[in-house]
Amino acid sequence: MDGNKEIITGSDFKRMIAGAYSAFLLEYENINSLDGTSLADLVCPGTNMLRTMAAAAMSIRNSNNDGIGAIACSVSNCAILGARGNSGVLLAQIFRGIAKGLAGKYDVDSSVLGKAFQYGILYAQRTSDEDTERSIIITAKAVAKGAHGAVRNNRPISEILAAAIAAGTQALKEFEAKAGCVDAGAKALMVLLEGCQSGLDGNFVSPALIFSSGTKTSHTVPEPINDIVYPYCVQMTIYNCKATVENIKKALAKYGKMIVVEKKMHDVRIHLHVERPGVIVEKITGWGNSYDIRVDNMAEYHKPLVLGRPLSKLSVLAVAENDADAIKLQHCGALVLMVDREKGLAVGNFINTVHSDIAEKYILLPNNANMNLVMRQTKCLLGKRVEIIYSSSFMEQMAAVKAYNAGITLEDNVRKMENALVKFRAEK
């Protein structure tokens, strides 16, 4: 081990994230054109990863945090809730692993950051529960192995990333030679690493400059403002509140989403989802004394409180592509979450719906296999409040939802709906 004394700060990490986002802006259409099998995402994996990356990048645009651990946590939280498609969930898990490796750190040496990236790859590996490893996981392992020596010897982070990129590039070439095509997942992993390296060196095109140059008018580049995530659920009560409900809602509207303000006698209860909880605590100063303040990080496992009286104890939450499908699903008793063609659906959309307290518990019913990891991520964050029926088409959704019975338990409904789905598939 040499005497490397390099220190990586929060500002360095911010540049890495900006560089990675810039790299995905330039490469996402190329990734879309490649084989997405390894990502378990056959529909626009590059766009899904770009949108997830945008959620991560937007989390630090106005951040006052200086510590690398706090910044990595913000990036991870927003990537997890902003994850779109199976490919986006895999990318978000990389950031979750990195954040775990940097937790509690203000700044780090290159060895610690290198190990954090290895944690990220490990978390991505854990996301897939299949017996057969996909090429993105094989490439990730090659990257980790290639960087291991540089990490162990405490080399500068630029050398660690260079070793990782060299190993990944070789693995990518070997897969291409064997399969006769370039794998989208392996390519995306290289885009991430190369973008982080460019960001650290300061050798990248600023995302702001890309948008200001008019790219949005000539290409279908998603607007990053649509990917802003509000990862914290804040609940509090203000005693003898001096402000009206209407004024409180108006004041809080610019800071969050899912705002619920209820007046009970002289007290006011507030519930909202925000980017930065501290801003809300500061904002309520002058309205009255607050107590029972609770802040939940929705990107981690949590138990959302039932604030009011849900309309039902159990509901099916089905994803629909169009109005015709939505009407048929609703006719069978399902709530419908429509896919916005511009914005798509992220993990956070399902989290927000559960927090709206329409029902006490939900059965999630996707309409394609490209959402399977999004469903699993939602389940991991909400626990027993949700269950999933892994339907992969509208017709499968209909077969399952027709077996739904609002008068029986969640567990009994899951069994009935899964059996109906098995029967439908056998009869096809």
Image: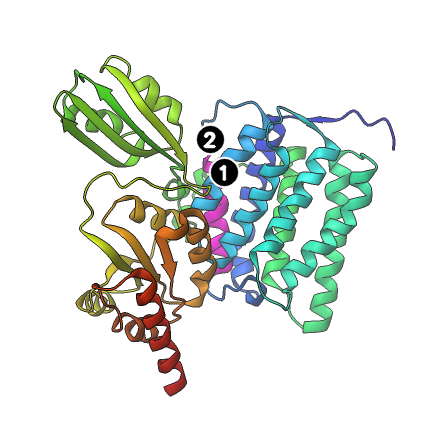
Colouring chosen for the image of the structure = rainbow
Question: The disc labelled 2 sits on which kind of residue?
Answer: Arg
Question: In which quadrant of the rendered image does the C terminus lie?
Answer: bottom left
Membership of 48 in magenta stretch: yes
Residue extending furthest right? 1
Q: Secondary structure at mark 1?
A: helix
Q: Is residue 160 left or right of residue 426?
A: right
Q: Nearer the viewer, residue 411 or 418?
A: 411
For label 1, the crowd category at 10 Å Cα-Cα, with few meaning under 14, some 14 to 19 and many 20 or more, is many
| 204 inside magenta stretch | no
The percent position of residue 98, horizontal first and vertical second, equals 61, 40
Mark 1 sits on what residue? 57
Left or right? Give the position of 135 relative to 54: right
Query: Is there a contact, CB below 8 Å, between mark 2 and mark 1?
Result: yes
| Residue position marked by numbered label 2 in the rendering | 61
- The residues colored magenta run 44-59
Residue 149 in picture, x, y percent from top left: 82, 44
| Residue drawn 68% across the image and 54% down it | 140
**Vertical side of 392 occupied by 6: above or below:** above
Q: Nearer the viewer, residue 186 or 293?
A: 293
Instruction: Answer above or below: position of 26 versus 62.
Output: below
Query: Is 406 left or right of 142, judged from the image as shown?
Result: left
User: Any mark on residue 143, and which?
Assistant: none
Per the model, the C-alpha gap separating discs 2 and 1 is 7 Å
